[in-house]
Amino acid sequence: MDTSFKVAPSILSADFSNLGDEIKKLNETDCDFIHIDVMDGHFVPNLTIGPDVIKSIRSLTNKVFDVHLMMDPVKKYLKDFIKAGADILTVHHEISEDSLECLKEIKRNNILAGISIKPSTPSSQVIKYLEYVDLVLVMTVEPGFGGQKFLNSQIPKIEEIKKMTENKNINIEVDGGITIENARLVKDAGANILVSGSTIFSKKNYSQIIDNLRMA
Ligand code: DX5
Ligand code: ZN
């Protein structure tokens, strides 16, 4: 995957009673990915959606489905997400299973793989995954809920990962609390994919806010 700048709306903040229409609306914008947060009520204290919902919206758009798996266990479900139409599967470093094994399984299925780290996990923990991943997802809030405040403390971590991935074809995705105000900060630190839930879905005109994030 190329490492150009990308915007990934997170449908966690979409109107779930009109999910199909929300996906169609995003399809008409120039967003790059659609970020889908899967939460299991165990790895994180919230429950969201599973493969059947992803499958049901797959036919509505050709946008890249960027699926963020906040799940533990996760390995036995990877195939279901791949069959449902995920283009990118990101697993967490902090799970009780072997994350590297999960990444290898994802790559064996010829889709893109990502590793994510929570705010308390140091950047050094991603080194062992770099050979196997297309992206590193840096959480800038505690995973579990949309609409939380961006953690400035994560900026140096983005810079460190940027250094580690220099000359590698690896994307740096940032997720949590992204606003027009902090988007520039995050980009300057080295991120090239911005996930955004509440900032995008709180506005009527998704295209406008996506453009604003892109240009920030
Ligand atoms: C949080 C999720 C995020 C969330 C971001 O655990 O991983 O993707 O939807 O939402 P905002 O942009 O509102 O922080
Ligand atoms: Zn996410």
Image (cartoon, grey):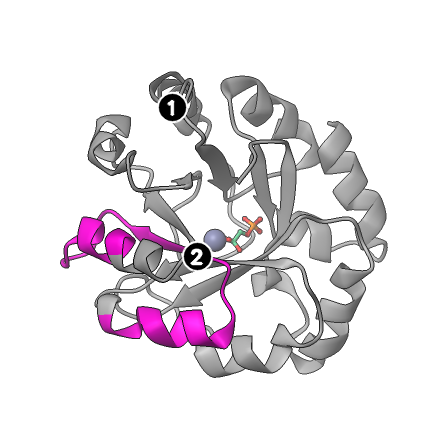
Q: Is residue 87 left or right of residue 42?
A: right
Q: Is residue 31 left or right of residue 177?
A: right
The amino acid marked with disc number 1 is Thr
The boundaries of the magenta stretch are: 76-104
Q: Is residue 30 above or below residue 150?
A: below
Vertical arrangement, residue 209 with respect to residue 189, above or below: below
Q: Which residue is mark 2?
A: 111
Please tell me which residue is depicted at 68% across the width and 64% down the height of the picture.
62
In front here: 136 or 72?
A: 136
Instruction: Report x, y in % for residue 119.
Output: 33, 38
Residue ID at (50%, 44%): 176
Task: Decide whether residue 78 is among the magenta residues.
Answer: yes
Q: Which mark is residue 165?
A: 1
Q: Callout 2: helix, strand or loop?
A: loop
Residue depicted at x 32% and y 61%:
44
Q: Secondary structure at mark 1?
A: loop
Instruction: Estimate how packed mark 2 is, as few (under 14), some (14 to 19) or many (20 or more) residues with alpha carbons within 10 Å.
Output: some
The answer to which image quadrant residue 42 occupies is bottom left
Q: Where the C terminus falls, by quadrant?
A: top right
Q: Quadrant of residue 192?
A: top right
